[in-house]
Image (tube, grey):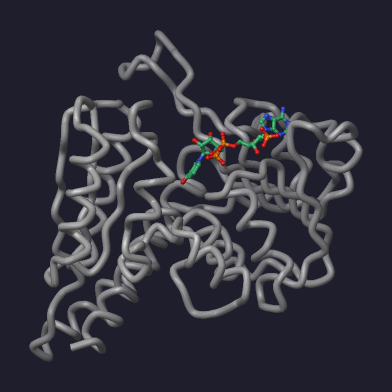
């Protein structure tokens, strides 16, 4: 078994981005600028947003963190989005999800200018991805593609099973793996909570990508010998022995599955850091796009 070290791979990617940004600045150009909108005080969301701000620093980007209490109204948040859409200093921005129940996430996503939607969640960007047109590909699936590519994992002609069909992970992941690209060119099966013969399908996977948010769901008897296993799941599981009071758990029972795999991602340290590095890639793209407009 070989560990797919997302932390190391993401550091390499961020260094490459930092080098490009240093060259831009040395030539008198403007650094990319990412804004992040955080609503409420959910611990997980605060950590994710803080890590994104830290990654901006690491890459030489400017960043702006806008925080609002969870009492903000939908209309007020839409006004924040409209202002960011218009702000020429901001190349791209994200609105961290989940949002409080009284705010319609779909409405917020639709209000973001697709040209600044570095999360790649806007329907226009998802549609462009489906058609293989240049776009911001959602950070998590894009990060997984980069991880496969940089670790020279062969995907062409392989059977890839994606578990979970969310708009931000499972569905775009299945599209990217089926595309005529490298990585890609896989034969893809997408399974979800209504799939009756999960075990049998997962067992037939050369590449198994799991994004369901159910800790330790994938057990050794669901994994083929020699499979590549990518674990997207990150759930906070209470753990009194940990100073933070919880441990992050993936969807794969890592300890029992690892010896059957050719490659496997750990949690933490696998897909998570790649997602953030991928957001930095999208922000650099957004900066280039904004500069061409001028
Ligand atoms: P989501 O929107 O909740 O979607 C979960 C998907 O899993 C749904 O399609 C659901 O099927 C499916 N599912 C649930 N239980 C299942 C079961 N028993 N068997 C088969 N399929 C099942 O989740 P998400 O946003 O994609 O996130 C999934 C996990 O990835 C979460 O732990 C999240 O925290 C993590 N995540 C990590 C990163 C990262 O950077 N590491 C990024 C994004 C998400 P139905 O559609 O049939 O309900």
Name of the residue lying farthest toward the front? 75
| Towards the viewer: 133 or 280 | 133
How many numbered marks appear?
Answer: 0
In the image, residue 93 lies at what x, y percent? Answer: 27, 58
Percent coordinates x, y for residue 274 in the rendering: 45, 56
Q: Residue furthest top?
A: 240
In the rendered image, which quarter is residue 211 located in?
top right
> Which image quadrant shows ligand 1?
top right
Depth check: 115 or 187 in front?
A: 115
Residue 123 lies left or right of residue 208; in this view the side is left
Q: With 37 as the anchor, is 169 left or right in this view?
A: right
Q: Position of residue 132 (x, y in %)?
A: 60, 77
Height in image: 58 above or below 264? below
Which residue is drawn at the image coordinates 78% and 42% (left, top)?
260
Left or right, 26 with reference to 52: left
What residue do we see at 60% from left, 44% from top? Answer: 166
- Residue at (62%, 35%) from the top-left corner? 212
Identify the residue at horizontal 44%, vertical 13% (top origin): 239
Q: Residue furthest left?
A: 28
Query: Where residue 261 sits: x, y (%)?
Result: 75, 46
Task: Specify the quadrant of the image occupied by residue 112.
Answer: bottom left
Viewport quadrant of the C terminus:
bottom left
Q: Is residue 264 above or below residue 150?
A: above
Q: Quadrant of residue 179?
A: bottom right
Towards the viewer: 113 or 160: 113
């Amino acid at each position: 078994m070989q560990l797919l070290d997302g932390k190391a791979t993401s550091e390499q990617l961020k260094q490459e981005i930092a080098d490009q940004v240093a060259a831009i600045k040395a030539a008198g150009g403007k650094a990319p600028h990412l804004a992040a909108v955080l609503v409420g005080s959910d611990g997980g969301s605060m950590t994710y947003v803080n890590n994104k701000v830290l990654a901006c620093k690491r890459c030489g980007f400017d960043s702006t963190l806008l925080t609002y209490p969870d009492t903000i109204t939908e209309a007020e948040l839409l006004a924040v989005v409209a202002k960011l859409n218009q702000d020429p200093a901001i190349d791209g921005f994200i609105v961290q999800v989940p949002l409080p129940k009284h705010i319609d996430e779909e409405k917020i996503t639709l209000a973001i200018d697709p040209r600044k939607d570095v999360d790649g969640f806007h329907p226009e960007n998802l549609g462009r991805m489906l058609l293989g047109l240049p776009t911001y590909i959602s950070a998590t699936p894009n990060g997984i593609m980069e991880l496969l590519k940089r670790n020279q994992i062969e995907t062409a002609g392989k059977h890839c099973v994606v578990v979970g069909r969310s708009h931000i992970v499972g569905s775009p992941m299945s599209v990217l793996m089926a595309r005529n690209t490298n990585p890609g060119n896989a034969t893809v099966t997408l399974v979800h909570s209504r799939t009756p013969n999960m075990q049998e399908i997962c067992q037939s996977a050369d590449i198994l990508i799991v994004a369901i948010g159910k800790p330790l769901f994938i057990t050794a008897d669901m994994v083929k010998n020699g499979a590549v296993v990518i674990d997207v799941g990150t759930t906070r599981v209470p753990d009194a022995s940990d100073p933070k009071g919880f441990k992050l758990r993936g969807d794969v029972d890592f300890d029992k599955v690892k010896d059957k795999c050719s490659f496997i991602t750990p949690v933490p340290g696998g897909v998570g850091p790649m997602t953030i590095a991928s957001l930095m890639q999208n922000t650099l793209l957004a900066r280039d796009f904004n500069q061409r407009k001028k």
